[in-house]
Image: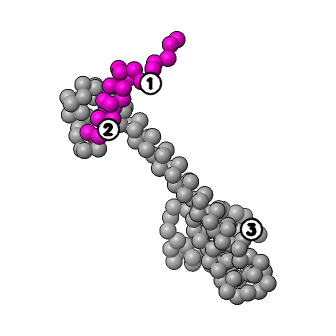
């Protein structure tokens, strides 16, 4: 089966209509108004806009992943530059290393990723990384640790 040329006048006109449909939707036009302006059916306009949004989400997600990787690499470089001094006990270097580690943990959302684990027969609570850490969460975790350490009976 022959493949359509991407540079054929008909293909270019079709792509321009697609872009116009997306721009009109961005401008707040209804799908019926887009259909009237472009000659593309309402359902096709809807599919085109949905496809454009999916592509945009993928692009944004890819950009975010790239930025995260770049920031993590920068933190690695900074930490590597002062790590030996930290191991030798330099308090300034230790402080900077801990700040770098804290920043890395925040970027990776490590502080919130507490999964349910069984420790000494006690089930620890699971926290959703998307949730904000509250005082109640802190109290619940403290209570669980007290049970584990035998300071309280639950």
Residue at (51% x, 61% y) in the render: 130
Residue at (79% x, 84% y) in the render: 88
Residue contact between numbered discs 2 and 3, judged by CB atoms under 8 Å: no
153 or 144, nearer to the observer: 144
Q: Is residue 102 at least partly visible in the picture?
A: yes
- Which residue was labeled with disc 2? 22
Q: In which quarter of the image is residue 118?
A: bottom right
Image coordinates of residue 91 in percent, x first then y, are 70, 88
Which of marks 1 and 2 precedes in the sequence? 1
Front position among marks 1 and 3: 1
- Which residue was labeled with disc 1? 6
40 or 3, nearer to the observer: 3
Left or right: residue 7 compared with residue 68 = left
- Which residue was labeled with disc 3? 119
Image coordinates of residue 141 in percent, x first then y, are 61, 74
Q: Which structural element holds mark 1?
A: loop
Is-magenta flag for residue 24? yes
Which of marks 3 and 1 precedes in the sequence? 1
Tell me which segment is drawn in magenta.
1-25
Image coordinates of residue 69 in percent, x first then y, are 60, 57
Q: In this view, does 69 lie above or below 24?
A: below
Residue contact between numbered discs 1 and 3, judged by CB atoms under 8 Å: no
Q: Is residue 34 above or below residue 99?
A: above
């Amino acid at each position: 089966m022959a493949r359509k040329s991407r540079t054929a006048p008909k293909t270019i006109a079709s792509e321009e209509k697609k872009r116009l449909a997306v721009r009109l939707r961005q401008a707040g036009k209804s799908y019926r108004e887009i259909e009237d302006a472009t000659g593309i059916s309402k359902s096709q306009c809807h599919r085109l806009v949905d496809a454009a949004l999916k592509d945009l989400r993928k692009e944004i997600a890819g950009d975010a992943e790239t930025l995260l990787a770049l920031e993590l690499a920068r933190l690695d470089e900074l930490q590597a530059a002062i790590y030996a001094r930290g191991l030798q006990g330099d308090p300034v270097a230790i402080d900077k290393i801990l700040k770098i580690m804290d920043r890395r943990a925040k970027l990776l959302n490590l502080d919130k990723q507490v999964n349910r684990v069984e420790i000494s027969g006690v089930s620890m609570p699971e926290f959703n990384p998307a949730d904000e850490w509250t005082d109640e969460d802190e109290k619940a975790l403290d209570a669980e640790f007290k049970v584990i350490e035998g300071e309280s009976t639950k």
